Image (cartoon, grey):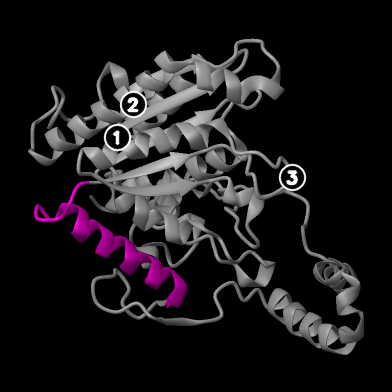
Amino acid sequence: MARPAQSDVPPVRRGQESVKLTREEFKRRFRQQFYDPAFDQLGAQIERLAAAAWDGYESSRKSPRTRRAGAGFADPDYELSVEWLAAREAVEAAARRQRDPASGSRVLLISAAARNDQTCPGEIPKSYRLAKLVQDVLRKEAIEVDFLDLSVLSAEYGRRILPCKACVSTAMPLCHWPCSCYPNHSLGQQDDWMNELYPRFVAAHGILIVTPVYWYQAPGGLKLLMDRLVCADGGNPDPTSTQGKDPHRAKQLELAGWNYPRHLAGRAFAVVVHGDAAGAETLRRSLVDWLTDMRLVQAGDAGALDRYVGYYGTYARSHEALDKDEPFQEEVRNAARALARAVRFVRQGRPEADANLSDPRPK
């Protein structure tokens, strides 16, 4: 389909207040990472680092190391971030492994609680314990388990998932696969975990999420992960087609007709949600809807579970309540068994009832 005429492309709307920092405010924020008195004798060196960081900020050097995109891109001469290219290569390698019929079946198992016994709470989360039950079942089913513990976001030095910038809300092609918003070195937005996580999702034949309810919603780390996976649902694998982050070009591409590639479609999934008083059913529905929207396949009725542990009981005894709730533990194991079967069905090529149907509303 031909691109629409320039006059037919909606204007890019702007008007927010400037976020540009003064040199003094930039340096004040930069120095905050050296607040520990152990750095007091390194003042001169820190000033040199601050000056270099300011230069990158002032010059907007988002991706200071780039190389020519090369063959296979709409604009082979466009300079792409070497970090993004490395992430793309990792995703493509994971996809080849996932599609290889000789490879072993693999499940990405996610413990979504933020609590970690190595930091402030000092106690293991129930989600982690339940995820370990799942892991035992899957291993007995001869399935390789990739265990993703999101509590390291609160407990491990430098580990973070940066927020989605909602490029998709401007135009779907502006949302690149994998995400190219980060790292942004000029803004100090580096060490984003997602470039390591995208290949782990791609390599999986099944995904199982075990999560608690936090104030009727998903824990913060899980929600960040969900938002950053928007690029897996219709994301543009060629940043050169939008000349990086040019919103006008992206609008042109979308209006010309966008095919919304589903980069994780066809994988099986199961979810286990637990709460203490309210919100478990709502969160379970949200997770199922999210995964289904990305065209993943639910592992039967047993693959979507919500329960309460120690309903309205004390937090102090919640682990003891889980110890006693053997039916819930077995339901969790059944979710794992159902996922194992669903993975086998998917890999055997058994079609779903709605397979190959045309989607009239692909967004």
First along the sequence among labels 2 and 1: 1
At 80% from the left edge and 84% from the top edge, which residue is drawn?
A: 51
Identify which amino acid the numbered label 1 is placed on: Val
Q: Are marks 2 and 1 in contact (CB under 8 Å)?
A: yes
Question: Which residue corresponds to the image point at 30% horizontal and 23% vertical from the top-left?
Answer: 334
Give the magenta range: 80-105
Residue placed under numbered mark 2 in the picture = 333
Q: Residue at x 60, y 58 (%)?
A: 159
Q: Is residue 17 left or right of residue 97?
A: right
Q: To which quarter of the image does residue 341 belong?
A: top left
- Compared with 4, 318 (above or below) is above
Distance from the alpha carbon under mark 2 to that under mark 1: 6 Å
Queried whether the magenta region covers residue 46, the answer comes back as no
Mark sitting on residue 137: 1
Q: Residues within 10 Å of mark 2 (few under 14, many from 20)?
A: many
For label 3, the residue is 120
